[in-house]
Amino acid sequence: MLKKDFWFDLPPQQIAQQPASPRDTARLLCMDRQNGALSHHVFRDLVTLLHAGDLLVVNDSKVLPARLIGRKEPTGAVCEVLLLRQQQGDVWECLAKPGKRMQPGTCVSFGDGSLRAVIQQTLPDGGKRVLFEYDTPTLYEKLDLFGRMPLPPYITRQLEDQSQYQTVYAKELGSAAAPTAGLHFTPELIDALKQKGVQFAQVTLHVGLGTFRPVKEERVEDHVMHSEWYSISESTAGLIRRAKAEGRRVIAVGTTSCRTLEAAAAQYGEIRACSGSTDIFLYPGSRFACIDGLITNFHLPESTLIMLVAAFCGYQNTMDAYKTAVREGYRFFSFGDAMLIV
């Protein structure tokens, strides 16, 4: 397939700039992936749309407030450092702006100067290897003080409350972007689903900014996927194996949970306790060995994420659903509305 096959026109006003409030009042487009039939709901209707015994698998990764605005020493020039992933100890892979002026040896201070970054190396992809210096037990205390949420570039307004870009069940620090399908859940909705008999299980996949990188190759299969770290616990693996054995549905909440489960299934032939890095790329023609359903937001044109959706429910079903969502005024991308595909 070609990248252009996944293009669709989206009016700019349908790019959500803030989440629904309350979270579970976002709209929900439900698709029967066997025939492409669509129905319109709100997210809290999951209580009636899901079945007792369904297993929802969520990504419990927590977003780092990883965007730091500081000043270059000694000139005072404003610059930005965005943490991507920890390499070793206090050394992180980062993006830096302005990159050409952030050469090895450059020092940047943040806030009151109690957090400093020293550029150690420019990496082949233009990123930076950065050493952080601070006076707290860990770097995370400083990020809480001085960091901002690394919102996608299409969100142009800053959040008044940074928790809006965090799922209510987030606990494992490490993501550079939120697993956004989970943003729609509230504690009350989770409780109502559990009372109905819906089960929950957690996996961890630390979302990298590669999730926003555009596909550059014209042929979809030529694209090289970014790598992300994931982990599946023994308790989660057991819940999934039991659900599959009993014929109950396993529904991934978000493309990150989906990629975690399908990567493990592809590697081991089953879901087992494991951790590591995955660069699995799911596009039409890919086979799914684990999930029976998917909850996901509406994704960017020509992105690996819309390709994953098309792999799961069919290319034509996907593009027809997106045309319907545009026509019906659904909100798109990270803070937008959602789909339930079963």
Image (cartoon, grey):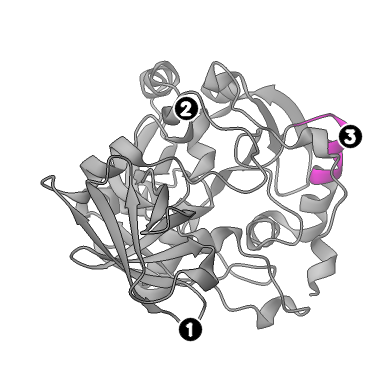
The magenta stretch spans residue 292: no
Mark yes or no: residue 291 visible: yes
Does residue 318 appear left or right of residue 202 in this picture? right
Quadrant where the C terminus lies? Answer: top right
Quadrant location of residue 57? top left
Amino acid, disc 2: Phe
Quadrant where the N terminus lies? Answer: bottom right
Instruction: Tell me the SS state at disc 2.
Output: loop
Which residue is tagged 2?
A: 185
Counting from the top left corner in percent of width and height, residue 122 is at 43, 79
Nearer to me, 147 or 188: 147
Does residue 284 appear left or right of residue 9 in this picture? left
- Vertical order, 182 against 20 (above or below): below
Mark yes or no: residue 48 visible: no
Counting from the top left corner in percent of width and height, residue 224 is at 58, 78
**Looking at the image, is mark 3 or mark 2 earlier in the sequence?**
2
- Magenta segment's dominant SS is helix
Which of the two discs, 1 and 2, sits closer to the camera? 1
Q: Residue at x 27, y 55 (%)?
A: 116
Magenta range: 322-330
Instruction: Tell me the SS state at disc 1.
Output: loop
Which residue is tagged 3?
A: 327
Counting from the top left corner in percent of width and height, residue 133 is at 20, 57
The magenta stretch spans residue 325: yes
Amino acid, disc 1: Pro
Q: Residue at x 67, y 83 (%)?
A: 222
Does residue 342 appear left or right of residue 268 in this picture? right
Does residue 238 appear left or right of residue 54 in this picture? left
Residue 124 is marked as: 1
Separation (CA) of disc 1 from disc 2: 39 Å
Separation (CA) of disc 3 from disc 2: 25 Å
